[in-house]
Image (tube, rainbow, N blue to C red):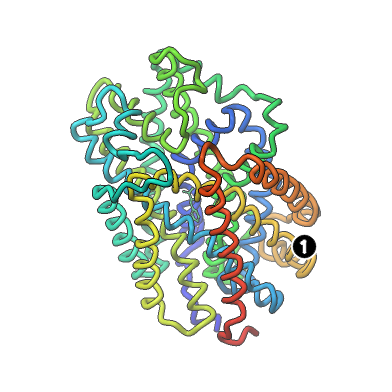
Amino acid sequence: MAEERERWTSRTSFIMASIGAAIGLGNVWRFPYIAYANGGGAFLVPFFFALFTAGIPLMILEYALGRKMQAGAPTAFAKIGKNLEWIGWLALFAVMLIFAYYPVIMSWCWNYMLYSIRLDWGADANSFFYKNFLQLTDGPGDLGGIRWPILVGLAISWLAIFLILYKGVRIVGKVVIYTVTIPWIILVIMLIRGLTLPGALEGVNYYLTPDFKALLRPGVWLAAYGQVFFSLSLGMGTLIVYSSYLSPRSDIANNAFITSLGDAGTSFFAGFGVFSVVGYLAQAMNVGVPEVTTSGVSLAFVTYPTAIKLLPFWASLFGFLFFLLLLTLGIDSFFSQVEPFVAGFTDKWRFRKETVLIFVTVFGFLAGVVFTTRGGFYWLDIIDYYTCSFGLTLVAILESITIGYVYKTWRLREYINDVSEFRVGRWWDITIMVILPLILGVTFILELVRLVRHGYGDYPTWASLLGALVLVLLIILSLILMKIKGREVE
Ligand code: PHE
Protein backbone atom coordinates (compact mmCIF):
# COMPACT_ATOMS: atom_id res chain seq x y z
CA MET A 1 0.00 0.00 0.00
CA ALA A 2 2.90 2.31 0.79
CA GLU A 3 3.78 2.84 -2.86
CA GLU A 4 0.33 4.32 -3.53
CA ARG A 5 0.89 7.24 -1.19
CA GLU A 6 1.76 10.66 -2.41
CA ARG A 7 5.19 11.94 -1.37
CA TRP A 8 6.74 15.27 -0.54
CA THR A 9 9.25 16.27 -3.15
CA SER A 10 11.86 17.32 -0.59
CA ARG A 11 12.48 17.76 3.08
CA THR A 12 12.09 21.51 2.72
CA SER A 13 8.65 21.15 1.24
CA PHE A 14 7.59 19.00 4.18
CA ILE A 15 8.94 21.45 6.74
CA MET A 16 7.49 24.40 4.91
CA ALA A 17 4.13 22.67 4.69
CA SER A 18 4.18 21.87 8.41
CA ILE A 19 5.15 25.41 9.21
CA GLY A 20 2.51 26.61 6.81
CA ALA A 21 -0.06 24.49 8.60
CA ALA A 22 1.12 25.76 11.94
CA ILE A 23 1.52 29.46 11.27
CA GLY A 24 -1.82 30.92 10.43
CA LEU A 25 -4.65 32.90 11.87
CA GLY A 26 -3.85 31.09 15.09
CA ASN A 27 -0.77 33.25 15.51
CA VAL A 28 -2.04 36.64 14.44
CA TRP A 29 -5.71 36.41 15.31
CA ARG A 30 -6.13 33.76 18.00
CA PHE A 31 -2.97 33.96 20.06
CA PRO A 32 -3.26 37.69 20.86
CA TYR A 33 -6.89 37.42 21.83
CA ILE A 34 -6.46 34.36 23.98
CA ALA A 35 -3.53 36.05 25.68
CA TYR A 36 -5.59 39.18 26.16
CA ALA A 37 -8.62 37.33 27.50
CA ASN A 38 -6.43 35.40 29.92
CA GLY A 39 -4.71 38.34 31.48
CA GLY A 40 -1.96 39.27 29.02
CA GLY A 41 1.35 38.54 30.68
CA ALA A 42 -0.41 36.03 32.89
CA PHE A 43 -0.78 33.90 29.83
CA LEU A 44 2.80 33.74 28.61
CA VAL A 45 4.09 31.52 31.41
CA PRO A 46 1.52 28.76 30.86
CA PHE A 47 1.86 29.19 27.12
CA PHE A 48 5.57 28.47 27.03
CA PHE A 49 5.18 25.83 29.66
CA ALA A 50 2.58 24.13 27.49
CA LEU A 51 4.83 24.44 24.48
CA PHE A 52 7.59 22.46 26.13
CA THR A 53 5.54 19.98 28.12
CA ALA A 54 3.01 19.21 25.41
CA GLY A 55 3.55 21.01 22.12
CA ILE A 56 6.99 19.76 21.16
CA PRO A 57 6.71 16.24 22.64
CA LEU A 58 3.35 15.71 21.01
CA MET A 59 4.57 16.97 17.70
CA ILE A 60 7.39 14.44 17.80
CA LEU A 61 4.79 11.80 18.61
CA GLU A 62 2.46 12.73 15.77
CA TYR A 63 5.25 12.97 13.21
CA ALA A 64 6.55 9.58 14.26
CA LEU A 65 3.14 8.00 14.26
CA GLY A 66 2.28 9.18 10.76
CA ARG A 67 5.71 8.28 9.40
CA LYS A 68 5.65 4.85 10.96
CA MET A 69 2.08 3.87 10.19
CA GLN A 70 1.97 5.51 6.77
CA ALA A 71 -1.62 6.47 7.27
CA GLY A 72 -3.95 9.21 8.45
CA ALA A 73 -5.07 9.39 12.07
CA PRO A 74 -7.89 6.78 12.21
CA THR A 75 -5.95 4.07 10.41
CA ALA A 76 -2.78 4.90 12.33
CA PHE A 77 -4.62 4.32 15.61
CA ALA A 78 -6.33 1.22 14.25
CA LYS A 79 -2.89 -0.21 13.57
CA ILE A 80 -2.05 0.17 17.25
CA GLY A 81 -5.25 -1.42 18.43
CA LYS A 82 -8.52 -2.30 16.75
CA ASN A 83 -10.53 -0.49 19.40
CA LEU A 84 -8.49 2.67 19.28
CA GLU A 85 -9.45 3.83 15.83
CA TRP A 86 -12.07 6.20 17.25
CA ILE A 87 -9.34 8.40 18.74
CA GLY A 88 -8.22 9.14 15.21
CA TRP A 89 -11.75 9.95 14.15
CA LEU A 90 -12.20 12.19 17.14
CA ALA A 91 -9.10 14.10 16.07
CA LEU A 92 -10.63 14.54 12.64
CA PHE A 93 -13.90 15.75 14.08
CA ALA A 94 -12.05 18.27 16.19
CA VAL A 95 -10.45 19.61 13.06
CA MET A 96 -13.82 19.51 11.35
CA LEU A 97 -15.19 21.92 13.92
CA ILE A 98 -12.26 24.18 13.22
CA PHE A 99 -12.66 24.08 9.48
CA ALA A 100 -16.28 25.04 9.96
CA TYR A 101 -15.35 28.43 11.44
CA TYR A 102 -11.78 29.03 10.29
CA PRO A 103 -12.80 30.10 6.76
CA VAL A 104 -15.30 32.49 8.33
CA ILE A 105 -12.42 34.37 9.95
CA MET A 106 -10.77 34.27 6.56
CA SER A 107 -13.94 35.74 5.15
CA TRP A 108 -13.65 38.64 7.60
CA CYS A 109 -10.17 39.15 6.17
CA TRP A 110 -11.48 39.17 2.58
CA ASN A 111 -13.93 41.84 3.59
CA TYR A 112 -11.38 43.88 5.47
CA MET A 113 -9.11 43.70 2.48
CA LEU A 114 -11.75 45.58 0.53
CA TYR A 115 -12.53 47.93 3.38
CA SER A 116 -8.85 48.86 3.42
CA ILE A 117 -9.10 50.53 0.05
CA ARG A 118 -11.04 53.41 1.59
CA LEU A 119 -10.16 52.73 5.21
CA ASP A 120 -13.87 52.34 5.82
CA TRP A 121 -13.58 51.67 9.53
CA GLY A 122 -12.78 55.31 10.23
CA ALA A 123 -11.67 56.41 13.65
CA ASP A 124 -13.50 53.78 15.65
CA ALA A 125 -12.54 50.34 14.37
CA ASN A 126 -14.22 48.70 17.35
CA SER A 127 -17.73 49.87 16.71
CA PHE A 128 -17.24 49.51 12.97
CA PHE A 129 -16.51 45.84 13.48
CA TYR A 130 -19.56 45.11 15.59
CA LYS A 131 -22.15 47.53 14.27
CA ASN A 132 -21.36 48.01 10.61
CA PHE A 133 -19.60 44.85 9.70
CA LEU A 134 -21.07 42.04 11.83
CA GLN A 135 -24.29 43.88 12.68
CA LEU A 136 -24.21 41.82 15.84
CA THR A 137 -27.46 40.74 17.51
CA ASP A 138 -28.10 40.75 21.25
CA GLY A 139 -27.18 37.18 21.96
CA PRO A 140 -26.64 33.68 20.59
CA GLY A 141 -30.38 33.02 20.65
CA ASP A 142 -30.98 35.61 17.94
CA LEU A 143 -29.24 34.65 14.69
CA GLY A 144 -30.70 37.60 12.84
CA GLY A 145 -30.27 36.42 9.26
CA ILE A 146 -27.23 36.00 7.06
CA ARG A 147 -24.67 38.74 6.48
CA TRP A 148 -24.14 38.32 2.77
CA PRO A 149 -20.65 39.79 2.49
CA ILE A 150 -19.45 37.23 5.04
CA LEU A 151 -21.17 34.39 3.24
CA VAL A 152 -19.56 35.40 -0.05
CA GLY A 153 -16.14 35.47 1.61
CA LEU A 154 -16.79 32.01 3.03
CA ALA A 155 -17.66 30.70 -0.41
CA ILE A 156 -14.48 32.17 -1.89
CA SER A 157 -12.36 30.53 0.81
CA TRP A 158 -13.87 27.12 0.14
CA LEU A 159 -13.51 27.48 -3.58
CA ALA A 160 -9.83 28.31 -3.19
CA ILE A 161 -9.28 25.30 -0.97
CA PHE A 162 -11.08 23.00 -3.30
CA LEU A 163 -8.92 24.05 -6.22
CA ILE A 164 -5.67 23.74 -4.27
CA LEU A 165 -6.44 20.35 -2.75
CA TYR A 166 -7.58 19.00 -6.05
CA LYS A 167 -4.01 19.39 -7.22
CA GLY A 168 -2.64 17.27 -4.37
CA VAL A 169 -0.04 17.61 -1.69
CA ARG A 170 2.94 18.47 -3.89
CA ILE A 171 1.81 21.95 -4.78
CA VAL A 172 1.36 22.72 -1.08
CA GLY A 173 5.10 22.65 -0.51
CA LYS A 174 5.63 25.16 -3.29
CA VAL A 175 3.00 27.70 -2.33
CA VAL A 176 3.97 27.97 1.31
CA ILE A 177 7.45 29.35 0.72
CA TYR A 178 5.78 32.64 -0.17
CA THR A 179 2.81 32.46 2.12
CA VAL A 180 5.03 32.11 5.16
CA THR A 181 7.82 34.55 4.48
CA ILE A 182 6.07 37.61 3.04
CA PRO A 183 3.53 38.01 5.87
CA TRP A 184 6.42 38.15 8.30
CA ILE A 185 7.78 41.26 6.64
CA ILE A 186 4.43 42.98 6.89
CA LEU A 187 4.12 41.97 10.53
CA VAL A 188 7.41 43.72 11.21
CA ILE A 189 6.10 46.91 9.63
CA MET A 190 2.93 46.73 11.71
CA LEU A 191 5.00 46.22 14.81
CA ILE A 192 7.11 49.29 14.17
CA ARG A 193 3.99 51.41 13.65
CA GLY A 194 2.39 49.93 16.74
CA LEU A 195 5.36 50.51 18.99
CA THR A 196 5.75 54.13 18.01
CA LEU A 197 2.18 55.00 19.04
CA PRO A 198 1.56 56.87 22.29
CA GLY A 199 0.58 54.48 25.06
CA ALA A 200 2.08 51.50 23.23
CA LEU A 201 4.39 50.70 26.10
CA GLU A 202 1.48 50.35 28.49
CA GLY A 203 0.11 47.64 26.25
CA VAL A 204 3.46 45.90 25.90
CA ASN A 205 3.91 46.03 29.65
CA TYR A 206 0.59 44.36 30.13
CA TYR A 207 1.67 41.71 27.64
CA LEU A 208 4.97 41.00 29.33
CA THR A 209 4.29 41.37 33.04
CA PRO A 210 3.47 38.00 34.51
CA ASP A 211 0.60 37.83 36.95
CA PHE A 212 1.30 34.86 39.14
CA LYS A 213 -2.13 34.93 40.75
CA ALA A 214 -3.70 34.10 37.41
CA LEU A 215 -1.69 30.88 37.36
CA LEU A 216 -4.08 29.54 39.97
CA ARG A 217 -6.94 29.58 37.50
CA PRO A 218 -7.20 26.22 35.66
CA GLY A 219 -8.95 27.93 32.77
CA VAL A 220 -5.80 29.90 31.96
CA TRP A 221 -3.79 26.70 31.76
CA LEU A 222 -6.33 24.93 29.65
CA ALA A 223 -6.50 27.91 27.33
CA ALA A 224 -2.71 27.81 27.04
CA TYR A 225 -2.65 24.14 26.13
CA GLY A 226 -5.58 24.63 23.76
CA GLN A 227 -3.77 27.47 22.07
CA VAL A 228 -0.57 25.48 21.69
CA PHE A 229 -2.50 22.61 20.10
CA PHE A 230 -4.47 24.89 17.84
CA SER A 231 -1.44 26.79 16.73
CA LEU A 232 0.86 23.81 16.19
CA SER A 233 -2.06 21.96 14.58
CA LEU A 234 -1.82 19.14 17.09
CA GLY A 235 -4.52 16.72 18.16
CA MET A 236 -6.22 17.01 14.80
CA GLY A 237 -4.56 14.49 12.58
CA THR A 238 -2.95 17.17 10.44
CA LEU A 239 0.62 16.34 11.28
CA ILE A 240 -0.04 12.62 11.30
CA VAL A 241 -1.21 12.72 7.73
CA TYR A 242 1.47 15.17 6.61
CA SER A 243 4.22 12.98 7.95
CA SER A 244 2.64 9.92 6.39
CA TYR A 245 3.66 11.46 3.08
CA LEU A 246 7.29 11.48 4.17
CA SER A 247 9.60 9.04 2.57
CA PRO A 248 11.32 6.51 4.82
CA ARG A 249 14.31 7.70 6.78
CA SER A 250 13.31 11.34 7.00
CA ASP A 251 14.23 13.13 10.18
CA ILE A 252 11.58 13.59 12.85
CA ALA A 253 12.94 15.21 16.00
CA ASN A 254 14.67 18.15 14.39
CA ASN A 255 11.73 18.86 12.13
CA ALA A 256 9.48 18.98 15.16
CA PHE A 257 11.71 21.48 16.94
CA ILE A 258 12.00 23.71 13.89
CA THR A 259 8.26 23.77 13.32
CA SER A 260 7.24 24.39 16.92
CA LEU A 261 9.77 27.03 17.71
CA GLY A 262 9.10 28.84 14.45
CA ASP A 263 5.41 28.85 15.20
CA ALA A 264 5.62 29.91 18.84
CA GLY A 265 8.10 32.62 17.91
CA THR A 266 5.67 34.03 15.37
CA SER A 267 2.86 34.16 17.92
CA PHE A 268 5.04 35.84 20.50
CA PHE A 269 6.12 38.36 17.92
CA ALA A 270 2.59 39.07 16.66
CA GLY A 271 1.60 39.70 20.28
CA PHE A 272 3.83 42.77 20.43
CA GLY A 273 2.09 44.34 17.46
CA VAL A 274 -1.38 43.75 18.84
CA PHE A 275 -0.65 44.72 22.42
CA SER A 276 1.09 47.94 21.48
CA VAL A 277 -2.06 49.03 19.66
CA VAL A 278 -4.20 47.93 22.59
CA GLY A 279 -2.05 50.20 24.74
CA TYR A 280 -2.62 53.05 22.34
CA LEU A 281 -6.37 52.45 22.32
CA ALA A 282 -6.47 52.31 26.10
CA GLN A 283 -4.81 55.69 26.29
CA ALA A 284 -7.07 57.17 23.61
CA MET A 285 -10.18 55.83 25.33
CA ASN A 286 -8.88 56.74 28.73
CA VAL A 287 -9.38 53.26 30.17
CA GLY A 288 -7.09 50.56 31.49
CA VAL A 289 -5.60 48.03 29.06
CA PRO A 290 -7.89 45.19 30.18
CA GLU A 291 -10.99 47.32 29.53
CA VAL A 292 -10.31 48.10 25.89
CA THR A 293 -12.61 45.43 24.57
CA THR A 294 -14.83 42.85 26.18
CA SER A 295 -14.71 40.19 23.51
CA GLY A 296 -11.29 39.04 22.47
CA VAL A 297 -12.37 37.35 19.26
CA SER A 298 -12.61 40.75 17.63
CA LEU A 299 -9.23 41.97 18.87
CA ALA A 300 -7.24 41.56 15.66
CA PHE A 301 -10.00 43.21 13.66
CA VAL A 302 -9.86 46.23 15.91
CA THR A 303 -6.15 46.60 16.57
CA TYR A 304 -4.69 45.99 13.11
CA PRO A 305 -7.12 48.33 11.32
CA THR A 306 -6.43 50.99 13.95
CA ALA A 307 -2.70 50.71 13.35
CA ILE A 308 -3.19 50.68 9.58
CA LYS A 309 -5.22 53.85 9.67
CA LEU A 310 -2.48 55.54 11.64
CA LEU A 311 0.28 54.72 9.19
CA PRO A 312 1.90 57.92 7.93
CA PHE A 313 1.66 57.01 4.25
CA TRP A 314 0.20 54.39 1.93
CA ALA A 315 -2.19 53.29 4.64
CA SER A 316 -4.66 51.79 2.18
CA LEU A 317 -2.03 49.87 0.36
CA PHE A 318 -0.62 48.48 3.58
CA GLY A 319 -4.09 47.61 4.78
CA PHE A 320 -4.88 45.79 1.59
CA LEU A 321 -1.60 43.92 1.65
CA PHE A 322 -1.88 43.12 5.32
CA PHE A 323 -5.22 41.38 4.98
CA LEU A 324 -4.19 39.71 1.78
CA LEU A 325 -1.18 38.30 3.54
CA LEU A 326 -3.21 37.28 6.55
CA LEU A 327 -5.23 35.30 4.05
CA THR A 328 -2.18 33.66 2.59
CA LEU A 329 -1.14 32.70 6.10
CA GLY A 330 -4.59 31.31 6.70
CA ILE A 331 -5.01 29.42 3.50
CA ASP A 332 -2.23 26.87 3.99
CA SER A 333 -3.49 26.26 7.51
CA PHE A 334 -6.96 25.86 6.13
CA PHE A 335 -6.04 23.20 3.63
CA SER A 336 -4.04 21.39 6.26
CA GLN A 337 -7.36 21.04 8.08
CA VAL A 338 -9.24 19.59 5.18
CA GLU A 339 -6.52 17.22 3.96
CA PRO A 340 -6.46 14.92 7.03
CA PHE A 341 -10.19 14.61 6.88
CA VAL A 342 -10.11 13.54 3.26
CA ALA A 343 -7.23 11.15 3.94
CA GLY A 344 -9.08 9.64 6.93
CA PHE A 345 -11.89 8.52 4.67
CA THR A 346 -9.80 7.43 1.70
CA ASP A 347 -7.47 5.42 3.95
CA LYS A 348 -10.28 3.42 5.46
CA TRP A 349 -12.64 3.04 2.53
CA ARG A 350 -11.75 2.97 -1.10
CA PHE A 351 -13.43 6.24 -1.90
CA ARG A 352 -12.02 8.37 -4.62
CA LYS A 353 -10.21 11.35 -3.20
CA GLU A 354 -12.08 13.74 -5.48
CA THR A 355 -15.43 12.45 -4.29
CA VAL A 356 -14.57 12.94 -0.64
CA LEU A 357 -13.19 16.37 -1.39
CA ILE A 358 -16.40 17.52 -3.06
CA PHE A 359 -18.40 16.15 -0.17
CA VAL A 360 -16.22 17.86 2.44
CA THR A 361 -16.27 21.16 0.58
CA VAL A 362 -20.05 21.28 0.30
CA PHE A 363 -20.62 20.04 3.82
CA GLY A 364 -17.93 22.27 5.34
CA PHE A 365 -19.32 25.30 3.59
CA LEU A 366 -22.84 24.57 4.84
CA ALA A 367 -21.57 24.04 8.38
CA GLY A 368 -19.95 27.46 8.24
CA VAL A 369 -23.14 29.26 7.25
CA VAL A 370 -24.32 29.57 10.84
CA PHE A 371 -21.24 31.65 11.64
CA THR A 372 -22.08 34.08 8.86
CA THR A 373 -25.31 35.15 10.51
CA ARG A 374 -25.59 38.31 12.55
CA GLY A 375 -25.50 36.23 15.73
CA GLY A 376 -22.87 33.86 14.34
CA PHE A 377 -20.07 35.65 16.11
CA TYR A 378 -21.28 34.33 19.46
CA TRP A 379 -21.36 30.79 18.14
CA LEU A 380 -17.92 31.14 16.71
CA ASP A 381 -16.66 32.12 20.13
CA ILE A 382 -18.45 29.24 21.85
CA ILE A 383 -17.40 26.54 19.37
CA ASP A 384 -13.83 27.82 19.31
CA TYR A 385 -13.66 27.59 23.08
CA TYR A 386 -15.05 24.06 23.29
CA THR A 387 -12.98 22.73 20.45
CA CYS A 388 -9.68 24.06 21.67
CA SER A 389 -10.05 23.90 25.43
CA PHE A 390 -11.79 20.53 25.52
CA GLY A 391 -11.72 18.81 22.13
CA LEU A 392 -8.05 19.15 21.31
CA THR A 393 -6.89 18.60 24.87
CA LEU A 394 -8.97 15.44 25.08
CA VAL A 395 -7.40 14.07 21.91
CA ALA A 396 -3.95 14.97 23.24
CA ILE A 397 -4.59 13.08 26.47
CA LEU A 398 -5.84 10.04 24.58
CA GLU A 399 -2.90 10.11 22.18
CA SER A 400 -0.34 10.25 24.93
CA ILE A 401 -2.00 7.47 26.91
CA THR A 402 -2.23 5.27 23.83
CA ILE A 403 1.39 5.71 22.90
CA GLY A 404 2.53 5.69 26.50
CA TYR A 405 0.79 2.56 27.68
CA VAL A 406 -0.47 0.59 24.69
CA TYR A 407 2.13 1.09 22.02
CA LYS A 408 4.90 2.00 24.52
CA THR A 409 6.92 5.17 24.23
CA TRP A 410 10.29 3.44 24.15
CA ARG A 411 9.30 1.59 21.00
CA LEU A 412 8.33 4.76 19.22
CA ARG A 413 11.38 6.56 20.59
CA GLU A 414 13.70 3.91 19.21
CA TYR A 415 12.11 4.41 15.87
CA ILE A 416 12.46 8.17 16.14
CA ASN A 417 16.11 7.95 17.12
CA ASP A 418 16.77 5.63 14.25
CA VAL A 419 15.88 8.27 11.70
CA SER A 420 16.41 11.60 13.47
CA GLU A 421 19.32 13.98 13.35
CA PHE A 422 19.61 14.01 17.11
CA ARG A 423 18.52 11.57 19.72
CA VAL A 424 15.44 12.07 21.83
CA GLY A 425 16.10 11.18 25.46
CA ARG A 426 14.09 9.54 28.21
CA TRP A 427 12.57 12.93 29.03
CA TRP A 428 10.26 12.35 26.12
CA ASP A 429 8.87 9.11 27.57
CA ILE A 430 8.29 10.75 30.90
CA THR A 431 6.53 13.72 29.36
CA ILE A 432 4.24 11.60 27.22
CA MET A 433 3.48 9.02 29.88
CA VAL A 434 3.17 11.13 32.99
CA ILE A 435 3.54 14.88 32.74
CA LEU A 436 1.26 15.58 29.81
CA PRO A 437 -1.71 13.39 30.77
CA LEU A 438 -1.45 14.40 34.39
CA ILE A 439 -1.39 18.18 33.97
CA LEU A 440 -3.86 18.17 31.14
CA GLY A 441 -6.18 15.73 32.85
CA VAL A 442 -6.29 17.73 36.05
CA THR A 443 -6.86 21.11 34.39
CA PHE A 444 -9.42 19.54 32.09
CA ILE A 445 -11.47 18.26 35.01
CA LEU A 446 -11.12 21.43 37.07
CA GLU A 447 -12.23 23.61 34.18
CA LEU A 448 -15.10 21.24 33.44
CA VAL A 449 -16.32 21.61 37.02
CA ARG A 450 -16.12 25.36 36.77
CA LEU A 451 -17.94 25.27 33.48
CA VAL A 452 -20.79 23.20 34.87
CA ARG A 453 -21.12 25.65 37.75
CA HIS A 454 -20.75 28.96 35.94
CA GLY A 455 -21.07 28.30 32.21
CA TYR A 456 -18.86 29.90 29.60
CA GLY A 457 -18.55 33.66 29.44
CA ASP A 458 -21.78 35.60 29.77
CA TYR A 459 -23.73 33.28 27.56
CA PRO A 460 -27.03 31.72 28.64
CA THR A 461 -26.59 28.22 30.04
CA TRP A 462 -28.36 26.51 27.14
CA ALA A 463 -25.87 28.00 24.70
CA SER A 464 -22.86 26.70 26.62
CA LEU A 465 -24.57 23.35 26.98
CA LEU A 466 -25.15 23.14 23.25
CA GLY A 467 -21.42 23.59 22.71
CA ALA A 468 -20.70 20.67 25.05
CA LEU A 469 -23.38 18.57 23.39
CA VAL A 470 -21.71 18.94 20.01
CA LEU A 471 -18.53 17.50 21.50
CA VAL A 472 -20.31 14.53 23.06
CA LEU A 473 -22.11 13.77 19.80
CA LEU A 474 -18.83 13.77 17.94
CA ILE A 475 -17.33 11.27 20.36
CA ILE A 476 -20.31 8.98 19.71
CA LEU A 477 -19.96 9.47 15.97
CA SER A 478 -16.28 8.53 16.18
CA LEU A 479 -17.20 5.28 17.88
CA ILE A 480 -19.79 4.55 15.19
CA LEU A 481 -17.34 5.19 12.35
CA MET A 482 -14.88 2.84 14.01
CA LYS A 483 -17.47 0.07 13.96
CA ILE A 484 -18.24 0.42 10.28
CA LYS A 485 -16.19 -2.03 8.37
CA GLY A 486 -13.52 -0.70 6.08
CA ARG A 487 -10.39 -1.89 4.39
CA GLU A 488 -8.40 -4.47 6.39
CA VAL A 489 -5.67 -2.94 8.53
CA GLU A 490 -2.51 -4.95 8.48
N1 PHE B 1 -2.47 26.03 13.22
C1 PHE B 1 -3.35 26.77 12.40
C2 PHE B 1 -3.30 28.24 12.77
O1 PHE B 1 -2.65 28.59 13.69
C3 PHE B 1 -4.74 26.30 12.45
C4 PHE B 1 -4.93 24.86 12.21
C5 PHE B 1 -5.77 24.18 12.99
C6 PHE B 1 -4.26 24.18 11.22
C7 PHE B 1 -5.97 22.83 12.80
C8 PHE B 1 -4.43 22.85 11.03
C9 PHE B 1 -5.28 22.16 11.83
O2 PHE B 1 -3.92 29.06 12.18
Q: Which residue is drawn at 49% across and 72% down?
A: 343
Residue 115 rendering spot, x and y as whole percentages: 23, 37
Residue type, mark 1 in image: Gly
Q: Tell me: is circle 1 under 8 Å from ligand 1.
A: no
Along the viewing direction, whichever of 46 and 94 lies nearer the viewer:
94
Q: Name the residue under label 1.
A: 404
Is the residue 8 above or below the residue 394 in the image?
A: below
Residue 112 rendering spot, x and y as whole percentages: 28, 39
Residue 130 rendering spot, x and y as whole percentages: 34, 34
Q: Which residue is drawn at 80% across and 53% down?
A: 434
- Please identify the quadrant where the C terminus is shown: bottom right
| Identity of the residue furthest to the left in this view | 118
Q: Which residue is drawn at 24% across and 48% down?
A: 149
Q: Is residue 20 left or right of residue 472?
A: left
Say how many tags the image has. Answer: 1
Along the viewing direction, whichever of 459 and 263 lies nearer the viewer:
459
Q: Quarter-wise, where is residue 293 in the image?
A: top left
Q: Which residue is drawn at 61% across and 22% down?
A: 209
Q: Can residue 10 be seen in this view?
A: yes
Q: Quarter-wise, where is residue 470 in the image?
A: bottom right
Q: Can residue 105 be seen in this view?
A: no
Label 1 environment density (alpha carbons within 10 Å; few <14, some 14–19, many ≥20): many
Along the viewing direction, whichever of 271 and 69 lies nearer the viewer:
271
Along the viewing direction, whichever of 379 and 238 lies nearer the viewer:
379
- Please identify the quadrant where the N terminus is shown: bottom right
Is the residue 215 above or below the residue 340 in the image?
A: above
Secondary structure at badge 1 equals: helix
